[in-house]
Amino acid sequence: MKLSNVVVGTAFVWMSTIAVAAEQPVIGLITKTDTNPFFVKMKEGAQQAAQAGGVILLTAAGKFDGDNAGQVSAIENMIAAGAKTILIVPSDAKAIVPSLKKARDKGVQLIALDSSTEPKDAVDALFATDNYQAGKLIGQYAKAVMGGKSAKIATLDLFPGHPVGIARHTGFLDGFGVKANDPSVVCMQDAFGDQAKGQTAMENCLQKNPQINLVYAINEPVAAGAYKALKAIGKEKSVMIVTVDGGCTGVRDIKAGAIAATSQQYPLKMASLGVEAGIAYAKTGKKAMGYIDTGVHLITDHPVAGVESKDSQFGLDACWGKK
């Protein structure tokens, strides 16, 4: 994996010029991909903080979500380039740990962004959304909207074992007030965060139980796929969809009525705080420690009593991706 262009103060330079500014702190950012708008926004936040702090920022990303080998190469390249802090969105929470240990043994501060490693203490700190709370908020909202109506729930999840997927799913169920084996959960499908797979998962669930009236989707692309499947059979107005992300496309889907509610997270803040922690480590030798909650808001244009929320205009002002 190649490292991308580097930020030094307000100027963009290439790897061959890093030695010229060797006295400046070097901070690395490794995301899952370069194309997902969430990670594009994260990179933007890191660049802004690096420019403001006058530090060198190295960036790299996997070729696809799950590219652990690419992230391993990026860590090795960044250490060789003198990075003393590495921010990483782990593609594989377990497989990346040996490489993180090698970096830590060399005195590198390690900060996970968005999702944790397994074990969590493989890094010094985690800057992320409280994904359990994000799920809980949309579960509480769905429960309040449903009132006493009998729920037939489909959950369109990430994939087995991923900590973000588990946290959001568990939070939703707890917010709605049901257990994983509750009979109201009539279908559970993995959608891998992908719109096309979300559509297929929704179609499979509808074949299993046509009476589904509530859909929990792991993220907004999956929610969009679910909506497309429902619209194809004329059920888009009779089934409520709730989800997590807060991207601009998803918030526009809130405004259009395709999605009832989303929990918005803030990737720019995750990365900017991570870079600031890297600057502090370079200056003081003190590492960031533990979990830092970067915030979440419920976004909906149909608020309900007892569940705090913001409207779609707030969501659009704070969203990521193309506005």
Image (cartoon, rainbow, N blue to C red):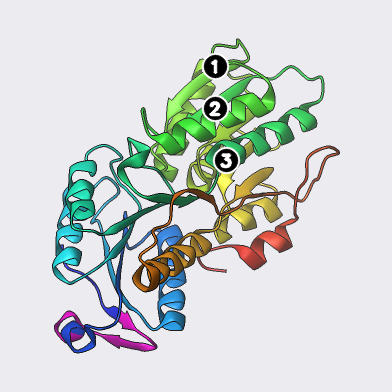
Residue carrying label 3: 227
Residue 303 falls in image quadrant:
top right
What kind of residue is marked 1? Answer: Ala
Residue drawn where x is 35% and y is 40% of the image: 121
Rounded to the nearest angstrom, the CA distance separating label 2 from label 1 is 8 Å
Residue carrying label 2: 170
What kind of residue is marked 3? Answer: Tyr
Rounded to the nearest angstrom, the CA distance separating label 2 from label 3 is 22 Å
Which of disc 1 and disc 2 is earlier in sequence?
2
Q: Which region shows up in magenta?
A: 7-17
Label 2, residues with CA under 10 Å away: few <14, some 14-19, many ≥20:
many
Query: Is residue 16 found inside the magenta-colored segment of the image?
Result: yes
Label 1, residues with CA under 10 Å away: few <14, some 14-19, many ≥20:
few
With respect to residue 106, does 143 lie above or below? above
From the viewer's perspective, is 232 left or right of 261? left
Q: Is residue 239 visible?
A: no
From the viewer's perspective, is 84 left or right of 212? left
Query: Is residue 150 found inside the magenta-colored segment of the image?
Result: no
Residue drawn where x is 60% and y is 41% of the image: 134
